[in-house]
Amino acid sequence: MKKNWYSLFTVLFLLLCAAPFLFMPLLGPSEAAANEVLASRPILFTKHGLNFEYLNDLSGYIGDRFAFRQELVTANASLTAALFHESASPSVVLGSDGWLYYANTLDDYLGTSVMSRRELFRAAHTLALAREYAESQGARFLFTIAPNKNALYPAHMPKKYPAAQQPGNRKHLTLLLQQQGVPYCDLYATLSQEPTPVYYKTDSHWDGYGSALACDALVKALGGTGSLSSENFTLAGHRGDLYEMLYPAGTALELGRVLARPRTFSYVGGFHAADDMTIRTKSHGDMGSLLMFRDSFGNLLHADLAESFSRAVFLRSTALRFDLLDGADTIIFELVERNLPQLLTNPPVMPAPVRQFTPPTDTIAATVEWTKRPCEELPELACYTGTVSLPEPLDWDSPLYVTLNGTTYEASLTAPAGQDFTLYAPETETDPQFFIRSGGIWLCCK
């Protein structure tokens, strides 16, 4: 009799373990929650023939998509939080009093990823070049940083994460932007003055009132009035992105402030959601035309700014695509604090500025490896990228000049990972000459 009970228990246990896979054909594969990226359905035959990685792909697909996955993940996260006050998701930090933080901001918070002096200069100087080009096209340029949530509200961070005592990338970069003459709107100064939080507890972003405050600060920095935050707001339920990442099957909503009145702008062309890659708007605003480069903080901010501009284009991009300027007379570039290092790897798409320069006679034994490719964004130009290796230290604030057919251009000090510079300039069959500064002296790289 006891043996029968053992057998029955074993069968039930195996059925329970197999249930998520047995129900998968009936219920369908589980979908991603928040910004999860799950394995795609595997393909047995590709255009190149048999997919020999099919079984590995199938294993990954089932592991990500089995039935009841989100419910089981949520149950595990709830149990882990209740028993150990720890987050079950590597992407979410569990704070006190229901506060959640994005784990990708920990490096900034702890001060473990501070950019070097040279890297900070490269970022600031690239923005200065962008401002110079924008103004040459008759457009004003404004850069702003959306603060990390734990930079504004560190009180609820777990005690095991001590806040950095030294200034981080945002503060260092702000000082260099001033030196480089880059118009900058300090949203940290604006938002930190508010007596009540303007970020959601369970989301990594600001609420509607925080977005309105940011909008007002940007509009004022551009010479407008900026009074949206003084209007009436109402409360609405919101499902935080961090909450969804931690508890994908959870249903709790957090109340947040949203503008009480209807919007006074309209969308042009197709609009699906606030995280569309391209959003176009028109309104009766009196501040001209806007091109805004933004990240997810622009999901709310775009609707606030759209009311002030007669027409606007909002691009979800951290690469300054000036080839899409299309006559805009205002450019805003918004970037969240945690992504400031991206300024080093996303060069602006724009013609390199011409410099009046007397080539030096001194040379230095440097290794310059460069490549040239056609430029789809700027068809009349070629794109030069490369690296420079020096036997002597490079001045931390040295630009890089490149001479092509007797004309000297300044290269952008940002480039894809592993590269040092990017240059959009006329194509030439002759090899370019490169000039850098070391020890205060301009040198020709040979």
Image (spheres, rainbow, N blue to C red):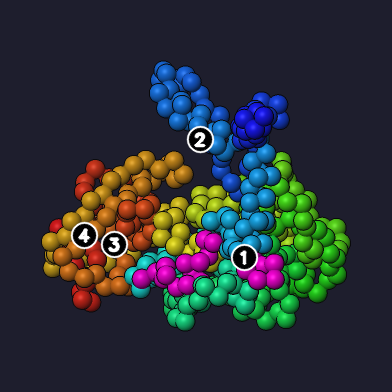
Disc 1 vs disc 4: Cβ atoms closer than 8 Å? Answer: no
Q: Nearer the viewer, mark 3 or mark 4?
A: 4
Q: Residues within 10 Å of mark 4 (few under 14, many from 20)?
A: some
CA separation, marks 3 and 4? 15 Å
Secondary structure at badge 4 equals strand
Q: Residue at x 47, y 72 (%)?
A: 110
Q: Quadrant of residue 3?
A: top right
282 vs 213, nearest the viewer = 213
CA separation, marks 3 and 1? 54 Å
Along the polypeptide, which appears first: circle 1 or circle 2?
2
Q: Quadrant of residue 202?
A: bottom right
Q: Three-letter amino acid code at disc 3?
A: Tyr
Disc 3 vs disc 2: Cβ atoms closer than 8 Å? Answer: no
Q: Was residue 68 drawn as part of the magenta stretch in this picture?
A: no
Q: Was residue 102 drawn as part of the magenta stretch in this picture?
A: yes
Along the polypeptide, which appears first: circle 3 or circle 1?
1
Identify the mark at residue 401; answer none if there is no mark.
Answer: 3
Along the polypeptide, which appears first: circle 1 or circle 4?
1
Residue annotated with mark 2: 60
Along the polypeptide, which appears first: circle 3 or circle 4?
4
Secondary structure at badge 1 equals loop
Residue annotated with mark 4: 389
Q: Residue at x 65, y 33 (%)?
A: 2
Q: Nearer the viewer, mark 1 or mark 4?
A: 1
Along the polypeptide, which appears first: circle 2 or circle 4?
2
In the rendered image of this protein, does residue 400 appear above or below residue 69? Answer: below
Q: Three-letter amino acid code at disc 1?
A: His
Residue 322 point in image, percent of width and height: 51, 53
Q: Residues within 10 Å of mark 3 (few under 14, many from 20)?
A: many
Q: Residue at x 67, y 56 (%)?
A: 78
